[in-house]
Amino acid sequence: MKEPQQIDDLDRMSEDVDRLRTISNRFSRIGFSPKLRRLNIVEETILAINYLRDRIPKQVTINTDVEREEIFVNLDSESYRWAVENIIFNGIDAMEGQGNIKIKINLQDHNVSIKILDSGKGMSKKTLEKAFESGFTTKNKGWGLGLALVSRIIKNGHKGKIKASSKEGEGSCFELIFNNAP
């Protein structure tokens, strides 16, 4: 009979294998059009956040401010969650592993706005202008692909918009905008 710790370890390893499969699928789909389906963007965002909760430093809090529990848009679940996770991880890097991330989801006319705000060090105007350029990074070990892929996922794959604002010393805000008309 397996000990409780062994079961926990096996469950965690199984989750890690599933996660590696997801990452592999994500990279293999770069360059392909996403498969959009009518999904609840609130639920998809919460699923991305819940996945991250066990994988981020304990000194980071993630809070959500959700106007409605159900807002449907045309989404590719996997690529959308990848975009959200990437923005959150960038925020955690900017906060040096401690601080607050707030996610606001609002419905405005026929558009859904997802704002991801971090309490990090913020970006200069020059850095902000280059943030979505492929190959641009401020990290020592970065490749400069994360936000470029996020932009491509949102703009090209979902026909959405992405906006960024930041002020040095005050954090950054990334806003994803999707049309929710059927």
Image (cartoon, rainbow, N blue to C red):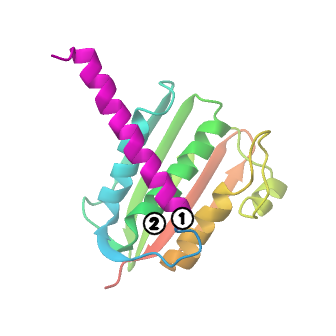
Write the residue at 42% across / 46% down.
Answer: 19
Say which element carries label 2.
strand
What's the residue type where badge 2 is placed?
Ser
Q: Which residues are magenta?
A: 1-28
Q: Find disc 2 in the rendering and name its residue.
A: 113
Q: Nearer the viewer, mark 1 or mark 2?
A: 1
Say which element carries label 1.
helix
Q: Place residue 52 in its image quadrant.
A: top left
Q: Is residue 72 above or below residue 98?
A: below
Q: Is residue 87 above or below residue 133?
A: above
Q: Find disc 1 in the rendering and name its residue.
A: 28
Q: Quadrant of the C terminus?
A: bottom left
Spot occupied by residue 46 in the image (x, y as percentages of width and height): 34, 50
Q: Place residue 45 in its image quadrant.
A: bottom left
Q: Quadrant of the N terminus?
A: top left
Q: Callout 1: few (<14), some (14-19), or many (20+) C-alpha neighbours within 10 Å?
A: few
Separation of residues labelled 1 and 2 (CA atoms)? 28 Å
Residue extending farthest left:
1
Any part of residue 140 in sight: yes
Spot occupied by residue 161 in the image (x, y as percentages of width and height): 56, 73
Q: Which comes before the other along the chain, label 1 or label 2?
A: 1
Q: Which secondary structure dominates the residues rendered in magenta?
A: helix
Spot occupied by residue 63 in the image (x, y as percentages of width and height): 41, 41
Any part of residue 163 in sight: no
Residue extending farthest front:
1
Write the residue at 44% across / 57% down.
Answer: 81
Magenta stretch contains residue 27: yes
What's the residue type where badge 1 is placed?
Ser
